[in-house]
Amino acid sequence: MKQKLRLLFAAALTLAATYSQAQTADEIVEKYLETIGGKEKLATIKSIKMIAKGQQGGMEFPMTSIMEAPNKMVQSINFQGKEIVVSAFDGKEMWKTNFMTMKPEKGETEDSQNAAKSADFPDPFLDYKAKGYSIALEGEEKVEGTDCYKIKLTKKPVMVDGKEEEDFSYYYFDKENNVVIMQKQTGKKGQMKDLTVETLMSDYQEVDGIYFAYNISQKMNGQVMFSMTIDKIELNAPVDAKVFAYPVD
Amino acid sequence: MKKFSIFSILISFTLNSFAQEALPIKGDEIFGSMRARHIGPALMSGRVVDLEGHPTDNKILYAGAAGGGVWKTADGGVTFNPIFDKHNQSIGAIKVDPKNPDQIIWVGTGEIWTRNSVTIGDGIYKTTDGGQNWNHMGLPKSERISSIKINPNNTDEVFVGVLGGLWSDSEDRGVYKTSDGGKTWNKIFYINASTGCSDLVMDPNDANIMYASFWQFRRTAYSFDSGGENSGLYKTTDGGKTWNKIHNGFPNGKLGRIAIALAPSNSKILYSVIESEKDEDKGLYRSDDAGANWTRTNGDFGLVVRPFYFSRIVVDPKNPDIVLKAGLNGSLSRDGGKTFKNIGGGIHADVHDFWFDLHDSNRIYLCDDGGVYRSYDGGSIWDMVKGIPVSQFYQVAIDNQTPYKVYGGLQDNGSWVGPSSKPGGIENRDWISVGAGDGFRTFPHPKDPNIVYSEMQGAENIWRINLEKNSAKTIKPFPEANDPKFRFNWNTPITTSPHNADRLYCGSQFLHKSDDRGETWVKISPDLTTNDPAKQQQENSGGLSMDNSGAENHCTIFAVNESPLDQNIIWVGTDDGNVQVTFDGGKNWNNVTANVPDLPKNTWCYFIEPSSFDKNTAYAVFTGYTSGDFKPYVYKTTDGGKTWKPIVSDDIKSFVRNIKEDYKNPNLLFLGTEGGLYVTIDGGQNWSPFKNNMPPVAVHWIALHPTEDALVMATHGRGVIIVDDISPLRQLTKEIIAKDLHFFTTKPTKMAESGSFGGYARMGEFVGENPSRQANIVYYLKSRHTFGKMSMEVFDKDNQKIADLPPGKSKGINYVDWNYSLKPPKVAKGKTIVSGGFQGPTVLPGTYKVKITKGNKTYENDLVLVADPKSIHTKEDRILQHETAMKLFAMNEELGYLVEQIDNHQTQLNAILPSLTSSKLKKQIPLAEISKNLETLKESLVVLKGDNYVGAAEPQLREKISGLFSEILGYTGRPTNAQLSSLKVLDEKLGEAKVKMEGLKSQISKLTPAMAKAKLPEIKPNRSFEEYKAAEN
């Protein structure tokens, strides 16, 4: 009994020692990719379809999100039996449904051009160098009471109101579990300019060998603004290209 | 099996023993998602000390506040956001990197306008991501950084002027240089321990040329001294290696604070404002030869007034002859400094800095004791920024109204009363002025909601205000025939009594008591101070410029509190370090100062909190900052002051101003420090800084609401900040922290009732955050939930699930809001969206069950909703409202189902119609007619055209039912009779529509044999109503 106890203590100490070793940004990201399923597996993902429930200000609505390599996506909510596209990108143009007319409208040209540059699918950290992204370890911070590594991810510059700006955000990797539990981004445009949104990830679950955060909550100043709980994720299901395209009457 | 169980016992034993030892009961791990809210106000804003723009983008401007951090606008000054909330909130200087202006910004902390209430900085910071993250770059003991200059050709080379300590000698003063972007610093110029660098200017054309002004100055608690042999203006032409005095043309003798500025459009032209011995020498000096010779051009009041507060000159970037000078009102010259006019149409007094727009010099920004202002006409008329809540409260009090009101006094901005919540948020216009001048202690009469007491500096006035009658009566005590002159602190203590509602205390060197709201005063103590005559020479204070404002009054009472358990026990603390207590209502006083261990002599007793658990227990806090001692001093006595025990820990990083004992748990204490709020849950063994939406701002006073459990803080720089419900902190024990998940006991939620109107603030105006009106579900999580499912559901008494909520997953305390409403009804599909589909009926008061499912474990807790005891509605009204809402809820869904049936039938009919080719068949099977009738029916039920805005079509039954449903939900009391009869009408119409539908359905089913004969497909019945309701779509 005593012997066993000592062994356990020793094991715990070794574990603690491993954790306390300094890590580089690349090591943290490598470990993360490995934890969520491995690079090879991630690279096989060509499309992701998510069925979810969104919650905002006491309201609840079904959501669907479809993403396809390299950067196509459509996100819609169903409201009173109507399908409303909150955000869509067909590879060239951003668009969404106008809430007054229920008709599609296009986004600003520069936003579309920025979206075309995005290489976040299926995970921004996968082959980040090849994508022209860079990472830097910016220290450690506590997130929701949990010790995290803070990594700055810098993507290719984007255009903001006609001016080129750096595009970066911060990712917080849970030191114990090696997964991202928060992303922090500061708005660049319009009324969100200079306001920071914290996106918290939890409820990680496995789909075909890859872990996804099944709950994503957005906070501002510590207050939950929006929460999305995923019911189902389908990988590599056939997707009709039409779903991304700007609807023509 | 046996092995397994032993092993698992072993594991749990090990884990537990680990957990016991390593229990972290500190910081974020306790507070979790418990957060503060800010209510401002910003209508008077607060002292802003430095403005700094962007070198190429005139939409961007930074404002540094005296005690409220750094604020940025990116829209030319309409809206400002705080960007420095994790760090020291006292700002000295801001500088934007000229080469990387979007990324690199430097902030030097520590205000340099050295008034008595100024706080301290903790060094220099730098951001490399435009202000999202800041790194501390050193100079931790600099206290006050006056200027930061960057070599435009090599921006890793930065020069910093350190003004340094105000209250003590400091060898950290001088000019510092870094050549590696702030990693290392060298002190390149130093005069002595009492003379600091008050300004540093770099020639924009040659970074080797710099001008540095040095100022000899010192403040004590009772005096101020500006000037000396060592003040001077220096120049370097070799990048700071050598410095030479450039005084040719300056007055002889001692000099005081010297302002220096260079004309950006002609770097030979310099301006300097000089404080000197003789009045006729003071004023503005100009040099046209880069400092070699100086000529005095002006000595107006606006140029010479209070140099310690106003030594800033700003020159137009395009025109070297347009000069702005900070001052009581601010001055502007258009002739190179020969003559000046006062600016100041519409600004607060006490101007500290200016910024010219890059492209249009008529556009000027200014900052002063009342925030930031914009002028579009070259400085004649000014418009205030109403969105920078950096108000500097000295104190805060609350009352027992619902919602409770907040009272407090502000640095140079009067005294105010405002609501703690308001429909639409707490706006600037919701605050009522209850005092002029500098405001300090402001208290409501404990029983009469119309009466407020307030004061101005040095008790020049103490007012009793009648809010209802709009009158203010001066009620301060006067010396009687044999009394000496009364000495009142700048921040004179007045306070009310927990025992006698009409009682008021006021402290000079004596304690004064009134039992009739300030009409009659009785002196109930001898002089309780040290009465040291050496510390009472205020008429000689100021140094080269006399400055006898009352701010240096000393040997005065500062803290007064009557015990909540015994009105004869009164505690008094003085600014010269005495702690005095009486146990017989003032007949006898005990000076217990000597009993306080390890406390330097004459350390200011800032606050005494008599315990509400035991009358011999009290807490006292002391601050030594007025002698340069920044250590925290917090003590507790349990024997009426005979012995004191320190209750500080190393966790506390700055000096202390206030302490509040919880009303329910004597081990729960709240500490107001110069660096924010600290909390202990173990009687002071461990302290944790509270950081959730709470900057490390100076907390001067803390009030705790006895029934709402709201902690209300007077911050000296970020207005009033509130933590709405601290009750979970009372319940934390080591046992709870060891549990995986623990639900806290919460008070029954008083259900919010429908409000009136509110929310009319415009873009750029600050709106204070309201408390949550929802029910709080509060629990502690031992570790953050990251893997696997976690959900939260609410059930009613019949165990029916009525809500799904997103649970909080933070380690520590989690708060989840529930709006105690059912889900919205499923409304009929139409062309447009209806309001009734956005909300569900509010549930009735009662007990509900909350269930958290985490992995394969579930946790349950009751949640009790009660009607607001102050409700204007009866129970019957509330039930009628609920029943009406539920009836309309059902009607919405019945209609939705009806429309679904129509659509379903139409789809099937439309598929068949083309098969009905012959006219015989058409006659025999009249589906076309039925389809037409279905269409007509549908048109009477839902809007099928138009949009959600002005293209709206005539409303049909869906819109009418939904509209009435929204109306009923919008008022938490009895529906009107008109609404109830409208409900009847709509219900009848719905009934008729259902009958019509049944008729059409039976027509179809009668055709079934004929259709079968014609080999037409069968019309399939719709899914059931229950299936319809249960489905998401």
Image: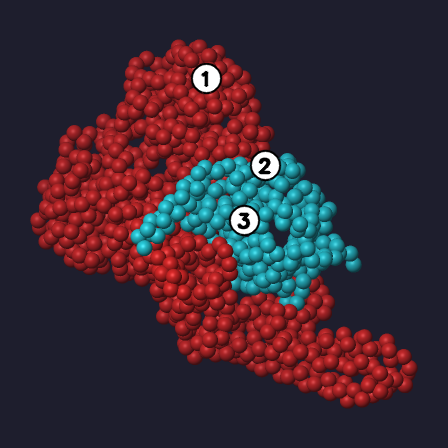
Disc 2 chain ID: A
Q: Which color was chain A given?
A: cyan
Labels 2 & 3 near each other (Cβ < 8 A): no
* Earlier sequence position, callout 2 versus callout 3: 3
Relative image position of residue B170 (x, y in whole percent)? 30, 25
State whether residue B270 is above or below residue B500.
above
Query: What residue is at 73 percent from the left and 67 percent from the top?
Result: B945
What is the three-letter code of the residue carrying label 1? Met
Tell me the SS state at disc 2. strand
Q: Nearer the viewer, residue A60 or B754?
A: A60
Q: Which color was chain B given?
A: red
Relative image position of residue B906 (x, y in whole percent)? 76, 76
Quarter of the picture containing the N terminus of chain B is: bottom left
Quarter of the picture containing the C terminus of chain B is: bottom right
**Is the residue at mark 3 from the same chain as the one at mark 1?**
no
**Is the residue at mark 2 from the same chain as the one at mark 3?**
yes
Can you identify the residue that label 2 sits on?
A: A134
Mark 3 Cα-neighbour bin, 10 Å: few <14, some 14–19, many ≥20: some
What is the three-letter code of the residue carrying label 3? Thr
Mark 1 Cα-neighbour bin, 10 Å: few <14, some 14–19, many ≥20: many
Can you identify the residue that label 3 sits on?
A: A35
State whether residue A44 is above or below residue B133.
below
| Mark in the foreground, 3 or 1 | 3
Residue B663 is left or right of residue A77, and the answer is left
Q: Nearer the viewer, residue B262 or B1029?
A: B1029
| Mark in the foreground, 2 or 3 | 3
What is the three-letter code of the residue carrying label 2? Ser
